[in-house]
Amino acid sequence: MINKFVSLTTRSTSGWPWPEGSAGRDSLYGPDGWCRQCGTPKVPQVGPLIIQRTKFPKAPVFMPNWLFDIVCVNAEVAESVANLGVSIRPVLTPRGADSGVFQLIHETPVSKWYGDAELTDSTVRVHGDDPDAPNQFCAACGRLRWAPIAEREAPPARTEHLRGHFIASAEWFGAGKSSHRHILFSETLARHLIRAHPRVWSIDG
C-alpha cells in the first residue's frame, strides 16, 4: 500500500548530541563521514546517536538539538511504531550504555523530491534577496545544499511512488555548519507520534 505522507511541526528541540564538538555527527557518520565545513554527511548513518546525560529529554517524542532530520521516542512509543514496520535504533549515552530511548530510522529515496525550478521559487520566496539563496555548492565537499526552508514552505514533494512510514529527502538544506534533510511521516505514524506528545507535535498546516 502506498502511504499518504504529511509533515510534522515540533514546538521545541531537546537533548544534546555527543560528541558536542561535532553535534553528534562523529558517532553517526564517523569522523571522516561528514563535511566539517557545511555539516553535510558524506555517507549513510554508520553509528548510533549519542545523547548527553545532562538535561536528557524526558519527552516521549523529541527532535534532538542541531539534528533536524532525526526523531527519537521512548520505549513505549518505540514498541508501538515498530509494530508498524518502522525501523528503530537504540540511542546511547557517551559511555555506551542504552539510554532507554530509540531513534526512528528513515528511508532515503535515490530520486529527488522536488524540481529545481519549483524549489528555487520556494527558497527565494522565503529568503528573498539573500545572496546565499536559493542554493550553494560547498567549497570543501562539493555537495549542493539548499537554503533552509521548512517542509510546509517547499513545493509538493514527489512521494507518490514511495512506501514506508518515515522518509527523508535526497535534497539537503541548511546554513553554516548545519545540514538536514526534509522528513515526512505516513499519516499512521504521524497519529502515533502526536497521540504520544500532542502538546509539542502537530501536523503542519
Image: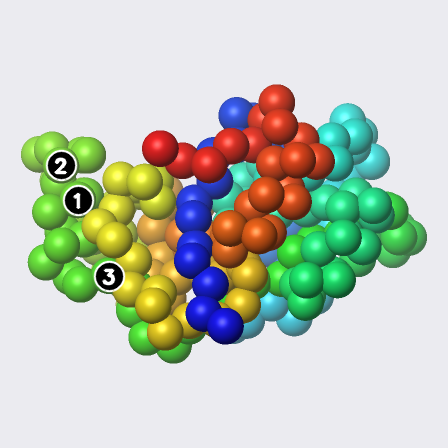
Residue 55: numbered disc: none
Residue furthest front in the image: 1
Secondary element under disc 3, as helix, strand or loop, is loop
Residue 137 at what x, y percent from top left? 24, 60
**Pointer 3 residue:** 114
Is the residue 65 above or below the residue 71 in the image? above
Q: 10 left or right of 114?
A: right
Q: CA separation, marks 3 and 1? A: 10 Å
Q: Which image quarter holds the C terminus? A: top left
Going by the picture, which residue comes out furthest to the top? Answer: 199
Q: 31 above or below 118?
A: below
The answer to which image quadrant residue 44 occupies is bottom right
Look at label 3 and name its amino acid.
Tyr
Amino acid at pointer 2: Arg
Q: Secondary structure at mark 2?
A: helix
Whether residue 18 can be seen here: no
Residue at which label 2 appears: 125
Place of residue 68 in the rendered image (x, y in percent of width and height, measured from the top left): 50, 44
- Earlier along the polypeptide chain: callout 3 or callout 1? 3
Q: Is residue 100 above or below residue 199?
A: below
Badge 1 crowding class, 10 Å Cα cut-off, few under 14, some 14 to 19, many 20 or more, is: some
Determine which quarter of the picture holds residue 181.
Answer: bottom left
Tell me whether circle 2 and circle 1 mark residues in contact (CB < 8 Å).
yes
Q: Could you tell me which residue is drawn at 54 percent across and 68 percent down?
A: 164
How many marks can you see?
3
**The disc labelled 1 sits on which kind of residue?**
Ser
Q: Which residue is mark 1?
A: 122
SS class of the residue under badge 1? helix
Residue drawn 29% across the image and 69% down it: 112
